[in-house]
């Protein structure tokens, strides 16, 4: 008799605990999707080459895109129209405070494409086609004397570019608290 | 001279708060009140008009008194070459307590504030996960949520101090890119768990739905530690300027990483190297190398009153008050000096003393009508001490001015005028 009571008691305990676990189970309401669904939505282009669209272009082709869409704010030669629109020039080893631009400062060429495709032109971001984005990226890099006027810029050639200040950064991402 | 009875705790008039507490309200009243009697001072005790006429009734959404219209953020003029870009600053010199009202929380936008219809907004999790997922707003509201009080500070806050100048700066103009609110939302770890993070995922890339598609990378261990997908701010839906319908909230870290209008989280092997973690929010040092990914905001404090452009009307007792915070923990102590850092006394902590949240401090000060330099210095729960401006300049110079957490000095002259100084 005693044994039976203990067994029943344990059975109730187990039943109760599964009930508690069930009631604590998390809400899971995400809808499954595929990466293919995100074509055109996921615009992240990484230094590894992940996320770059097919296609390509040259600086020679990009000049027109630049003159039409960018020069009004960034100046005819990337010299800028305000402090935050200078995108050409500078030298990290200059005597005075260095002018930090795409050419002198940025560690990765992938960032130029990634940023322009998503955020520029500032008045109409995401209005460029992928082709135009490659072309104008090539033109910005050409103005900074990083690639030639006829260098074909595509996913492969872009990530292979070594930027002048690529080794200028000290990664502190391991510091999560002081 | 009433000054003689004060228990002085540091040079140039800082008083023991314990002494003031022990003499009680009447004691403070006697010391602090004017010697001019009411009738002589021309105080009018006629029943005022507002006590004779009923006012308007209840309303749907409150507004502040029309007599407190100076509680305003300041912001730059619209700039045609930077559509929607720029910032607004909290009126720190007027605010009290630790919580910033939602309408006065600082803002920084890179392409303006999108007007998002939550029913058309997606939150996608993709990349190195077992199952890419999309969430909608209504469904997210059904998840278990947590609430935490946290400060948010722009990495660029107080940068002007390193450049120098700014004698006419106010607490707001120099330091107004910090605010504090109760954020309520879903631990990011819950949604990551649902998608199933693959072992090779070491970072995630978070992207906003604004016109700039602002993106930032976050190491995975921080992401699963305490990051929140915030849906509410001080109890109401996150304001559009703060990321409605949802923002990432990354406690203690530079403000820009708490991506607003959050629409995508992509699990990656490496940092995505977005523009706003390479070109911007990185700090070039003397030797021209540059710090990248400076995440936690430094241990910091600031006297908000008396502060720049205020004036003390006559010698007497003033409550020196301000806020302190640390991106690494809670505030353990705040010290105040009235003699430019020669002697220091502990301020009282006035209210909330929470992890990674603004903490209000206060200390009474008897101003004798002479010159003074008021400073505050925070010490956090890990023992980090707020540095001087000279120490920061010696360490990194001022080629870059992000992540500045140096001590602020306010000078008081014999006219009682308060201004920013470098000591």
Image: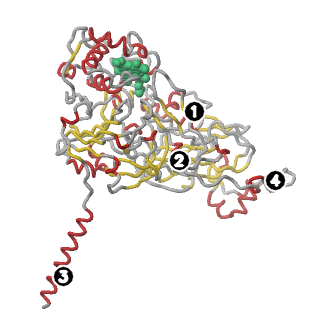
- Local crowd size for mark 2, using a 10 Å CA cut-off: few (<14), some (14–19), many (≥20): some
Can residue B60 be seen in this snapshot?
Answer: yes
Between B187 and B13, the one lying in front of the other is B187
In whole angstroms, how far apart are the C-alphas of marks 2 and 3? 54 Å
**Dot 3: within a 10 Å radius of its alpha carbon, few (fewer than 14), some, or many (20 or more) residues?**
few
Q: Is residue A101 visible?
A: no
The residue wearing badge 1 is B422
At numbered mark 1, what does the secondary structure look like: helix, strand or loop? loop
Q: Position of residue A165 (x, y in %)?
A: 30, 21
Q: Quadrant of the C terminus of chain A?
A: top left
Query: Is the Cβ of the residue at disc 4 closer than 8 Å to that at disc 3?
Result: no
Q: Chain of mark 3?
A: A
Q: Position of residue A117 (x, y in %)?
A: 30, 24
Q: Position of residue B182 (x, y in %)?
A: 45, 51
Number of the label disc, if any, that sits on residue A9: 3
Q: Which mark is on residue B35?
A: 4
Check disc 2 and report its element: helix, strand or loop. Answer: loop
Q: What is the distance, in whole Å, between disc 4 and disc 3 at their CAs? A: 79 Å
Q: Which of the colour schemes (rainbow, by chain, secondary structure, one colour) is used?
A: secondary structure
Residue in the foreground of this view, choosing between B207 and B333 = B207
Q: Which residue is mark 2?
A: B101
């Amino acid at each position: 008799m005693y044994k039976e009571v203990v067994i029943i008691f344990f059975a109730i305990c187990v039943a109760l605990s599964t009930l508690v676990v069930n009631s604590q189970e998390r809400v899971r309401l995400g809808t499954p999707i595929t990466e293919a669904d995100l074509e055109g939505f996921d615009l992240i282009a990484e230094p590894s080459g992940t996320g770059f669209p097919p296609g390509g272009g040259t600086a020679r082709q990009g000049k027109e895109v630049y003159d039409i869409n960018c020069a009004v704010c960034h100046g005819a030669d990337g010299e800028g129209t305000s402090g935050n629109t200078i995108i050409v020039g500078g030298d990290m080893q200059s005597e005075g405070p260095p002018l930090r631009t795409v050419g002198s400062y940025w560690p990765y060429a992938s960032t130029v494409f990634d940023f322009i495709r998503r955020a520029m032109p500032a008045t109409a971001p995401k209005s460029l086609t992928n082709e135009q984005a490659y072309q104008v990226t090539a033109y910005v890099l050409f103005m900074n004397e990083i690639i030639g006027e006829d260098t074909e810029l595509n996913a492969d050639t872009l990530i292979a570019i070594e930027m002048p200040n690529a080794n200028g950064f000290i990664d502190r991402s391991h510091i999560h608290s002081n | 001279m009433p000054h003689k009875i004060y228990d002085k705790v540091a040079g140039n008039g800082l008083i023991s708060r314990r002494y003031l507490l022990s003499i009680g309200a009447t004691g403070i009243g006697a010391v602090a009140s004017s010697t001019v009697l009411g009738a002589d001072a021309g105080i009018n005790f006629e029943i005022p008009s507002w006590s004779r006429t009923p006012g308007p009734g209840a309303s749907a959404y409150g507004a502040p008194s029309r007599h407190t219209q100076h509680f305003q953020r300041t912001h730059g003029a619209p700039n045609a070459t930077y559509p929607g870009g720029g910032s607004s600053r909290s009126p720190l010199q007027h605010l009290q307590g630790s919580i910033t009202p939602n309408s006065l929380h600082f803002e920084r936008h890179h392409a303006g504030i999108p007007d998002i219809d939550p029913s058309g907004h997606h939150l996608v999790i993709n990349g190195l996960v077992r199952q890419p997922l999309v969430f909608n707003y209504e469904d997210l509201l059904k998840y278990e949520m947590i609430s935490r009080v946290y400060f948010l500070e722009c990495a660029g806050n107080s940068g002007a101090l390193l450049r120098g100048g700014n004698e006419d700066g106010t607490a707001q103009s120099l330091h107004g890119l910090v605010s504090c609110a109760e954020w309520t939302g879903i631990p990011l770890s819950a949604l990551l768990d649902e998608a199933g993070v693959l072992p090779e995922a070491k970072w995630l890339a978070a992207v906003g739905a604004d016109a700039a598609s602002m993106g930032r990378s976050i190491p995975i261990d921080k992401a699963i530690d305490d990051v929140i997908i915030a849906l509410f701010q001080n109890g109401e839906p996150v304001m559009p300027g703060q990321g409605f319908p949802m923002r990432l909230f990354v406690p203690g870290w530079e403000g820009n990483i708490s991506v607003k209008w959050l629409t995508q989280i992509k699990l990656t092997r490496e940092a995505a190297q977005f523009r706003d973690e390479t070109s911007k929010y990185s700090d070039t040092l003397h030797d021209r190398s540059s710090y990248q990914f400076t995440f936690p905001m430094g241990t910091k404090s600031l006297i908000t009153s008396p502060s720049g452009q205020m004036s003390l009307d006559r010698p007497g007792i003033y409550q020196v008050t301000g806020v302190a915070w640390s991106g690494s923990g809670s505030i353990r102590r705040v010290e105040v000096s009235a003699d430019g850092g020669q002697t220091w006394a502990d301020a009282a902590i006035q209210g909330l003393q929470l992890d990674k949240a603004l903490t209000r401090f206060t200390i009474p000060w008897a101003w004798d009508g002479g010159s003074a330099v008021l400073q505050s210095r925070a010490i956090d729960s890990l023992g980090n001490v707020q540095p001087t401006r000279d120490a920061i300049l010696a360490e990194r110079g001022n080629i870059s001015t992000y992540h500045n957490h140096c001590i602020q000095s306010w000078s008081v002259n014999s006219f009682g005028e308060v201004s920013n100084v470098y000591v």
